[in-house]
Amino acid sequence: MRRALLAIAGTAAGLVMLLSFKSHTAPGGGTATAGGPGPPPAGQGSSASPSPAGLNGAGSSGASGNGTVSPGTRVVTGNVANTAYGPVQVQLTLRQSKIIKVAILEQPTSTNEDIQIGNFAFPKLIRETLSVQSARIDMVSGASYTSKGYVQSLQSALDGGSA
Amino acid sequence: MAGFVNHPATSPNRPAERQDPRRRTLPAPAPLRPRPELVLAVIGSGALAVLALWWQDTPSVHGLGDWLTNAGRILGLLAGYGVVVLVALMARLPPLEQGIGADRLARWHAMGGRYVVGLVVSHALLITWGYAVTAHANVVRQAGTLLTSYPDVLMATVGAFLLSGVGLVSMRAARRRMRYETWYYLHFYVYLAIALAFSHQFAAGAEFVSSLPARTAWSALYLTVAALVLWYRVITVVRQALRHRLRVAGLRGEAPGVVSVYVGGARLHELRAEPGQFFRWRFLTRDLWWSSHPYSLSARPRPDLLRITVKDLGDHSGSLGRLRPGTRVIAEGPYGAFTARHRQPRRKVLLLAGGVGITPLRTMFETLPGEVTLVYRASSASDIVFREELDAIAADRGATVHYLIGARARLGRDPLSAQQLKTLVPGLHRRDVYLCGPAGMTDTAVAALRAAGLPRRRIHHESFEF
Amino acid sequence: MPDRPRRDGPGQRRADPSRRAGPVRDDGRLRQAEHVMGTVFSFDVPADVGAEALPSVLRWLHWADATFSPYAADSDVSRLGRGEAALSECAAELAEVLGLCAEVRALSGGYFTTTPGGAFDPSGLVKGWAIERAAAMLRAAGSRNHSVNGGGDVQCAGEAGPRRPWRVGIAHPLRAGELATVVTGRDLAVATSGTAERGPHIVDPHTGRAATALASITLVGEHLTTVDAYATAAFAMGNAARDWIESLEGHEAFAITASGAVWQTEGFAAYAA
């Protein structure tokens, strides 16, 4: 019995030591704004292999911009999302509520595969964030629009102006 | 039967006469016999390497979910490694069997087995909890998600249950209630558990998913141990069986309930069995073929004949008395670290036997060179076996035998006290002592020997109950 | 993760604006839009079935508009609301709709209501119900793959193309012209409730004040009738809707709060493209 307790205590102590070493490493550079834990890794319940945190609305903080951008432009930096493969952090530049730039501040780079996937996936995600056409969608769902509002809506672009 | 081994086969003082000329044509390669501490160090460094794998793959750990998940990962890696170590311990690798001994290996395996089952269960719980915290999900739902949509996790969970089941069944309380053979065959489910759990390590394990070198090394480890198991527990046994073609040559009753079985074969010197070692014997009759049991050689092995002596303790041991000559036998071995190889040749020796423990010691008494004293402790005169042989050997080589007969209660004192032993055995504290007998007797004897001034390293004993 | 769709798709061909009916594309599908119920309905149907069945579907939609509109003085809904007609004198479908409204009201703890701001107005459920009915009529006419978008609420059946599930973009409520996310599926119903177009028009029935915690919430499920109604209720609930939707079988939610933060229910990721 005593040996069992020793084994349990020793294992627990070892775990705590190992994990504490790793928690002193900063989660990578980047202007992480004050925030709690990042958004949950996307695909945690659905896909076969966990993928890096989805960038759909990477938790934007209500941040004000830094002083180096032109007036009317806002820079919003998301919280660092700690995924199974490493930290991910996204920064958006907005002008008049329109995203004009997406920057990946932090992406997993600890293995060659991470870098390879990142080089492929992040530009793709950036493009899709910025463009409706490249999202290849069939329909748009949004808050109800009136007939007048329809004309300016994304849906009318898809319908090819057939109304 | 009386003619077989009734004479002391070879007196150690006249070695050249009876040497089989064939012996000299096979030079034995220096066998590898590592010390236990060395083996433990190797196992430990393997564990460190596994931890290093986690270390270099994990950039940082933040938040409760991360802590839990990574703790689970570490334990999972250690479990995957531990399972392979446990199998290797039982793979009947000659260096391990000779250097550490079957009984100690079995104890290590039992302790390690309990620890690994704990690792596996904790790994599963911590990973589930950690994922649930990170995904802001309810733990039960997260468990369901892991089981249904993560690759191979369901199989691994079944494996974990199998492993835990085998662990439970191996607890002393459970083993006492079941036959040895039942437990032995249930234990084989561990192989199935390992196979089931293997794929999830690669499919869902963060350290393996993206690292081909890690997967390669891990697979190499598993494959190596599997190959060793196959070689030493299956192929070698079959090869030995085909080469030596052992058959029961005859039986002889030694004492009430004690029978010697003579097993004949060809080229038996190639087995290189040393005095004090044992084989795992499988007698190919309809009732006995499916189990193997360890029995020590009770006489110096001849190139054509081996002898074991077995006391009827119920079930298997009792049925040996009914073996028919000509029955085929498969012997795995030799095993055992209870040999005289480490001793300094000039030291005197004390052989201390209790009850059926006389069996390996009788072989040593017959073969060890130098001055040897045998003390044989038994509860009653009818429990003494080999009396004529022992007396003949003693006379032949000028050695001494002391028979200490009588139950402790009847005698009023313990004949195995330090005082008694010092009187019986001159220069006791300078001797090498080889001790074999039931657990109670060996404990008493070890205590007495220590009290008489013997250092631990010169007290050698092997336990039969493991 | 579902397969990524092929590179071809809607929006590639330029429409001929002079024609009333939409163009028939190379893949044999017909795209058409129709002004009805104060908004525009968009259809994506197989060309053969569409040519035959769409006219009657559109006629039915106009009838539903006339029957259920709270803005038309002589609609059944308006007359019932003023007490001028008994339920038994109205169209049978109205009773069906009211029954559904009562269920959703109970299920949502009163957050879904047929009397927002006091007047009788079941529109929160009627639109989704009408769209789902239209899709059912198309199926009855022989179409297995079609999509109906009624002013932002979408009911899909089958797939958009061979081995290609439907992809529905969710408009971002705070960034005009941008998408917040894309959902994909086969028999898919998507409804978004929000303030972007018509301003804060959804009221929390318990407090009487406009619901302002969320900019928009999108619900995804299989049947638009319930999905649409739940979306309305969920918007009124605000952030508390998350736990409510989690407790509902077969429905997932994606929300953008007024400050631009995003949350989604646990199973939503299965729909995300």
Image (cartoon, rainbow, N blue to C red):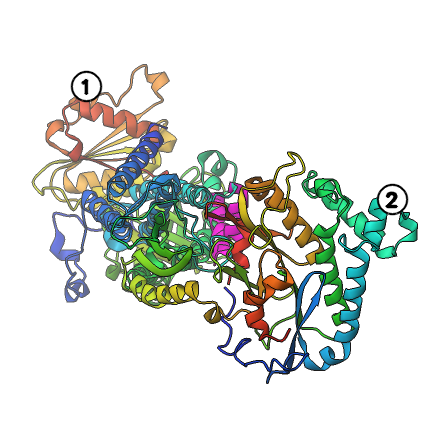
Horizontally, residue A18 falls left or right of residue B313, namely left
Q: Mark 1 lies on which chain?
A: B
Horizontally, residue A20 falls left or right of residue B145, namely left
Where disc 1 sits, the SS reads helix
Q: Which mark is drawn over residue B286?
A: none
Q: Is residue B11 above or below residue A141?
A: above
Separation of disc 1 and disc 2 at Cα?
116 Å
Q: Is residue B450 above or below residue C201?
A: above
Whole-percent x, y for residue B441 in the image: 31, 28
Residue B151 painted magenta: yes
Q: Nearer the viewer, mark 1 or mark 2?
A: 2
Q: Which residue lies furthest to the left in this view?
A: B346
Front residue (pair B385, C211): C211
Q: In this view, does C130 lie above or below B370?
A: below
Horizontally, residue A75 falls left or right of residue C95, namely left
For badge 1, the amino acid type reads Gln
Residue B254 painted magenta: no
Residue C26 appears in the figure: yes
From the image, tell me which residue sits under label 1.
Answer: B419
Span shown in magenta: B139-166
Whole-percent x, y for residue C220 in the image: 61, 56
Please name the residue shown 14% across and 29% down the image: B455
How many residues crowd mark 1 within 10 Å: few (<14), some (14–19), many (20+)?
A: some
How many residues crowd mark 2 within 10 Å: few (<14), some (14–19), many (20+)?
A: few
Whole-percent x, y for residue A118 in the image: 33, 63
From the image, tell me which residue sits under label 2.
Answer: C83
For badge 2, the amino acid type reads Gly
Please name the residue shown 71% across and 62% down the image: C131
Q: Magenta-highlighted stretch: main secondary structure?
A: helix
Q: Mark 2 lies on which chain?
A: C
